Image (tube, rainbow, N blue to C red):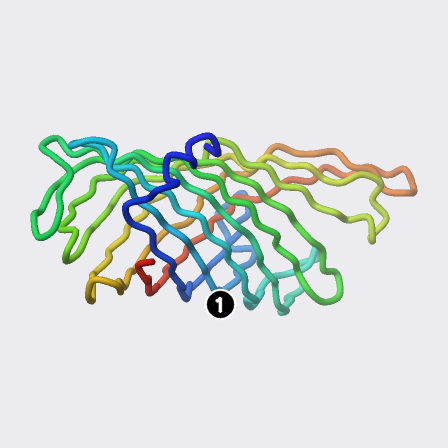
Amino acid sequence: MLLLLPQWGGAEELRFSYGVESFLWEEFDDNGNLLLDETGFRHVFALRGENRFDSQWLGDFDAHVVFGTVAYDGQDQSGNPVSTNTEYSGYGLEVGFNYFPSEVPTGDAAGAGVRLALGMDVWDRNLLGAGGYNEHYMATYGRVAGVYVTPAVWQMEFGAKLPVAASESVDLSAYGFVDEINLNPKGQPSLYANFSYNINERFLVGLTYDGYAFAKSDEDIVYNLDGNYYAIHQPKSSMQTLTLSVSLSL
């Protein structure tokens, strides 16, 4: 994807945005019972560009950073309730290609099309307090969506997101484990949607629903300093976000 970025060196449209994101992370046992949830608000700063390739194709890219502290409501290994906080920080990059069968709409003209995109997210999940630990995630994904656009006024996008590959590493060395735990959550499809409205030529407001869905990972066998081994997995998990943002045209 990085090889595609030079094409936007002279982007026809470039926007900087700040958003407040309502965040939800959930994990479930094999019977579908909730093990834990994390809720709260995170901050999102993003840079987005668009460039028209020809009369029917419009390219776009989005680069963002996200961070914030959310409330953790879960349990320990013995099933005792635990309430604490979790710190999140991360970044992402997405490159999209929009196809309009007639032509790329401009101004007050409306047009419908299809958007295909590839992206990557990287984030750290740091559970605070006694018994806390850090998880590092990386996920690559694809999107497919229908879009309906009136560039001078508003645009809508609705589609599906599918993680292509995901990895998770967990450092439990503080608790006597010899090696880092490496897991691969199994990506599942999820829905996403975006609506944006132009306040004027420079400012735009947007509302975006997005997230991830993962099935239970395979187990990783890890040893502690006493030579005992444990089979560890990442439970079925989901992330849901709803972001309200304001963008400034540069």
Q: Is residue 165 left or right of residue 126?
A: left
Circle 1 crowding by C-alpha within 10 Å: few under 14, some 14–19, many from 20:
some
Q: Which secondary structure, mark 1?
A: strand
Residue at the outermost right position: 226
> What amino acid does circle 1 point to?
Gly
Q: Residue at x 41, y 57 (%)?
A: 241
Q: Which x, y percent locates residue 235?
A: 57, 44
Q: Residue at x 68, y 64 (%)?
A: 128
Residue 202: which quarter of the image? bottom left
Q: Residue at x 74, y 47 (%)?
A: 171
Between 63 and 210, the one lying in front of the other is 63
- Which quarter of the figure is the C terminus placed in? bottom left
Residue at the outermost front position: 10
Q: Is residue 187 left or right of residue 17?
A: right
Indicate whether 41 appears above or below 232. Answer: below
Q: Which x, y percent locates residue 163?
A: 45, 36
Indicate whether 112 appears above or below 193. Answer: above
Residue 222: which quarter of the image? top right
Q: Which x, y percent locates residue 198?
A: 20, 61
Q: Which x, y percent locates residue 129?
A: 72, 67
Q: Is residue 122 left or right of residue 107?
A: right
Between 96 and 145, the one lying in front of the other is 96
Q: Is residue 131 left or right of residue 91?
A: right
Between 178 and 215, the one lying in front of the other is 178
Tag 1 residue = 40
Between 16 and 250, the one lying in front of the other is 250
